[in-house]
Amino acid sequence: MASRRVARLTVPLWLCLLGCLCDQNVYPSVGTLFVHKLEPEDYQQHFLNKSGQPHPINFRANLLGFPDLPRWLRCTQRSPGDSAYLYGSPTKPGKHTIEVTAYNRNTYEIFREKIIFTILPAADAPPPYEAEFLVTNVDVEEMLPPEARHNFQVPLQDLWNTQRLSVLNVTSALDKGGRVPLPLPGLKEGVFVKVGSVVPFPECLYETQKPQIRQQCKEGMKPVLCPKLLPSDFSIDWCNVTMVDEPGSSPSPPSLVPLEWDGEFNPPSDELGETDFLPGYLLTMLIPILIALLLCALLSYIMCCRREGVQKRDAATSDIQLVHQQSIFNNTEELRQMADNRDVPRPLSTLPMFNVRTGQRSSPMDLSGDSAHVPLILSQH
């Protein structure tokens, strides 16, 4: 960590304030756990701080030129005030350039740097005995510090009765399909820890693979094994213990038995006779066309030739309308004849001018008399 800080200070400060990429070099090995810690305190100097209080910083990492990290490498940070970790177990030698971006949550400033991963080949052969444990009472950030891994490794060494034990990988349970826990105090997501050794497994671990233990796990019971690990601070789920013997070896392929032939093999001739495709073409094309034509003819006959019922209905409707109209006309003529044959005088109210009291008839244009005797209608004019 000290060498990394010295290397960073050799870069001019004004270049870092502009968001330059400060290079770092790390050298992980294949098959071993690599953890690179990103401390927020180391990045506070790259952001302007007027209040004197430390800035909350978020870290993001990606492969240079790509949106994501290599498959073996992961980046995790619980909250902006906590440290971030780049961790993983490389699978093959190579070189990766990782771009780390630090975000200032208060001022929205960013600072970028490059970390060059030069992955070295494994110094030793992979351990022939590997076991993976699910620790349910810790998060992945709590297992990544060296002291936490040491505390987990020491009880296992006593159980294994060997010092040649190493932690090969640490994986969050969420990365293996685990569910996100509820935000309750003390509820953790869980961590898978893989260890390896050249010494065979202790008898205590073999008990986890027995049928009766597996049956208890299927029934929802939580068996407790390996009493030597009980005093430790880690809660192990014994239903999720995976053991691998000699992971580097591969099963030998089954032996191939040559086929026995009773005689000489005579392959079929490549010369094929000419094939007549005309019957198949006619069967495929003409039959659907004939069916379509038949359906069109049937539909045309129904739509065009079978309209007698409609015509008869229209004719009957027209006859009813004519009879109705003729009856109205006849009734009107009869009323007119009856009105012409009446001999009674016309009603007085229909005359041009009529005095109700005297019964005198006068022309409405003769206004020489007293205006008081003029009808009300004319006086209004």
Image (cartoon, rainbow, N blue to C red):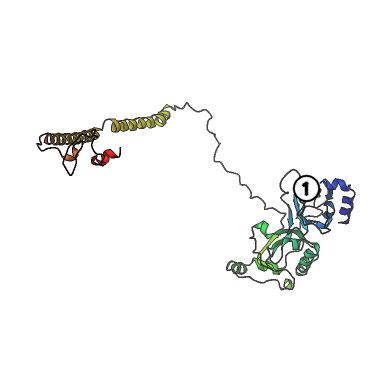
Residue 227 seen from this side: yes
Residue 329 figure quarter: top left
How many numbered discs, if any? 1
Quadrant including the C terminus: top left
Could you say where residue 13 lies in the image, as x and y percent from the top left?
88, 48
From where the camera sits, is residue 93 visible?
A: no
- Up the image or down, 358 lies above or below 175; here it is above
User: Of residues 105 and 351, which is closer to you in this image?
Assistant: 351
What residue does disc 1 label?
99
* Residue 168 % position (x, y): 76, 58
256 left or right of 130?
A: left
Asked which quadrant contains residue 344, the reply is top left
Q: Quadrant of the N terminus?
A: bottom right
Q: Nearer the viewer, residue 183 or 126?
A: 183
Q: Secondary structure at mark 1?
A: strand
Residue at 71%, 63% in the rendered image: 139
Residue 57 falls left or right of residue 222: right
Residue 4: x and y in percent read: 86, 53
Q: Residues within 10 Å of mark 1 (few under 14, many from 20)?
A: many
* Front residue of 86 and 363: 363
User: What residue sits 73% from the left and 56% below the top?
Assistant: 76
Kindly identify the residue that appears in the image at 79 percent across and 62 percent down: 145
Determine the image quadrant of residue 31: bottom right
Query: Between residues 314 and 43, which one lies in front from this camera angle?
Result: 314
| Relative vertical location of residue 177 with respect to residue 118 in this rendering, above or below | below
Residue type pointed to by label 1: Glu
Q: In the rendering, at what x and y percent does residue 171 appear?
A: 71, 58
